[in-house]
Amino acid sequence: MMTTTATEIVSTPDDRSGEHDRVLPGEIDASCRWTVLALFVGALFWLVAASGLQALSSVKLLMPGLLAPWEFLTYGRLEGAVSCGLVFGFAIPALMALLTWIQCRLGGQSLAGSLGFWIFGSMWNLGVLGSVLGILAGDGSGLAWFELPLYGAAPMAAAYIVGAGVLLLNVKLRAVREMHVSQWFLLLAVIWFGWAFTVAVLLNQTLSSGLVHLLVGYWFKQQMFFMTLLPGALAVVFYVLPKVAEAPVRPRSLVLFAFWTFVFIGPWGGIPQSAPLPAWMVSVGVVASTLVLVPILATILTVYETLGGNCGSLRKTSEGSLVMGSVLALALFAVMNWVRNWSGVAGVVELSVFSKGMSLLLVLGVCGLGVLGGIHHVVPKLTHSQWLQPSWARIHGTASILSVAAVVAGLILAGMFQGLQSNKLGSTASEIAGAARPMLALSALGCLSYFLAQSALFGAVLWQSALACRACCVPCLVDWAKDQRVEKAEVGR
Amino acid sequence: MKHGPFILVGLLLASASSWCGMVLAPLVQWRDLQPEKDEGTATYYPSRRSGLAEQGSEVYRAMGCFHCHTQIIRGRGLGMDLEKGLGTRRSVAIDFLYDHTVMPGETRLGPDLANFGVRSRKAGDTNGALARRSILVKLFDPRSVNSASIMPSYAHLFEVRKISRTPSPEALVLSPGAGAQSGFEVVPKPEAIALAAYLTSLDSQKSVFVAPVPKPVKKGGEKGTNASPSVVVETHSAPPK
């Protein structure tokens, strides 16, 4: 793992206008230490909670009698709470924390306006708590991946405006003017989510038609998955990657091309072929899912070129493996997202658990692994200490990658078997469920091990933060106690 | 790229154009969405659900049934929904015109319910009472109907109570071992009754302009009919007792 004093190998030396104003990495970390750590702790809490609920819901598909009398733990409610916890509880605030730190490091600046992030963190997490409890109590909106009830969504939207506003202010105040690739993706993710989220919440409140809500739900899901989680993960990848590979991102022209084509194609996809929407929208979505392969493949080629073809170098560190896992998940996602629209394939996989597998490939694979890689990279720097046991970090990285692979592969294969069986004339519901069962079991196993791995990470981050807190507070307390003693002695005299 | 504003303008252009295309344009297209009149019967499709069924749709949403059941029929070439008799045509926007919450669903872990109201009504069940009863039994204990079912039990939508002098006419008739102890009866709460009313109201078989029901070819003496197909679909293997 790198030390805090390692030089920033992030862009070519001629990019470094404003270099003289740069703050040292140690000071930068000190300025954002508690803000970023607090956001990580909140995000990891939700990751553990959501993956625990996910493990339960996946086991319930195999053992429907498990905890059956608990109304709030029925499958339908659990699923809504899981998606809310994973995306809104974990992914968005973890990305905000990572992007904030990355911005400070790349911008060569101390964190400005940390109060804004504390306001964001507390209001956002309260909103998520309200939403998850609300969904478990039956207040979900009925829109997949956007089930937030208004009383959760409204404070979250307000919190996000504050948090994103302060982050953008930090971008503006940067000492190093030239923007790194990672910062382009950062801006894309942060701005796009703010806009899509507030518009979706407002539209669903002001317009009462169920059809409009459905349309907004499809649109928002695409903007959140494609234009927020994906570029957010890429921002982390393009920061961590050059560090591990000790080389700048190259070729710049290719990644520039990838960025802009992605920005203009990405938001148009995501409409299922069976959706009850105008047929032209479905066609536009299919074309966009095909075209978006180009920027994604260009991005992956950039990663390959940056590594100089030596992908093995990434495996040396846990963050390298996790980031590589995220890139591989992205490659798989892009290809499958294209293939799923082929005429022979769509009729089999649509409306099966394949769709859930694809969503989780993006949320847990592309975004989740990238974010975990970022956390592995950043936490030791913020807490001034290595992970307790570097080998544990490696084990956590490998366990996370394998668990996500099992969850996603299980669902994707289960969906295919389910679709093939259900397209047989005269097949019964039990036969269809039976065809998917073995692969659903694999997925449930993946969910359980993912939950265990993330619980361990949560514990480790809490422990490291506590140690850092002690290291920071104990000397202060000792000084204070000394002062008190001296004062008392003086009064006594 | 040195300039944040350059990126900002690009992002603004991209997001505004996609929003206009993927949200505004369909909203404009749907502005004139109206119920369609069936000239033969002089009825309109779709019609509003009853208040009870409307409440039932809220229960359907609150329970997250849409995580396992779709309400969407795919057209020819995309799956075998029509061949399997799940519906007579593909689902389109107008089918959901009056729904307060539209829940087409993304995953079919259980059968599609877009036309459940039609197929649950057996011959002779004129007012749908029998259909509603069998649905209530299924909701109370799905595995009493199909031992391999993975559907959760919604027993909390029912009240198990001591039988007073006269048993409640609403009480479920359950198979032995599936119900309450002797001396007790299982009575649906209002939520369960509303949910059953919603499920029996699900019917999207009528022909509409954008998705007409194909007329069967008339051959010889056979009479063409546009009635619902005989539906024996992805349903439980054992009949309700």
Image: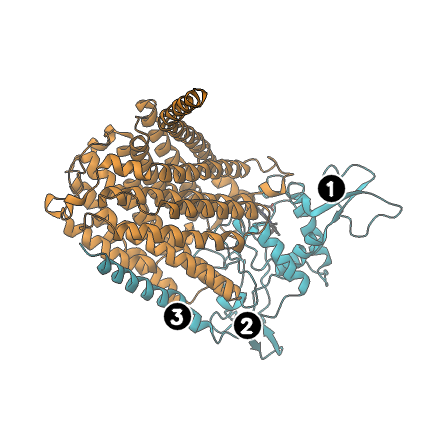
Chain colours: A orange, B cyan
Q: Chain of mark 3?
A: B
Instruction: Residue A300: give x, y in percent of width and height.
Output: 22, 45
Q: Chain of mark 2?
A: B
**Considering the numbered disc 3 on the image, is that residue within a helix, a strand or a loop?**
helix
Q: Are marks 2 and 1 on the same chain?
A: yes
User: Which residue is painted at 41% across and 52% down in the image?
Assistant: A160
Residue B112 shows in the view:
yes
User: Which residue is painted at 19% across and 43% down in the image?
Assistant: A22
Q: Which mark is residue B11?
A: none
In this view of the protein, which residue sits in the foreground, B136 or B57?
A: B57
Residue labelled with disc 2: B220
Contact flag, marks 3 and 1 (Cβ < 8 Å): no
Residue labelled with disc 3: B25
Q: Earlier in the sequence, mark 2 or mark 1?
A: 1
**Where is the N terminus of chain B found, in terms of image quarters?**
bottom left
Instruction: Residue B63: give x, y in percent of width and height.
Output: 59, 49
Q: How many marks?
A: 3
Residue labelled with disc 1: B175
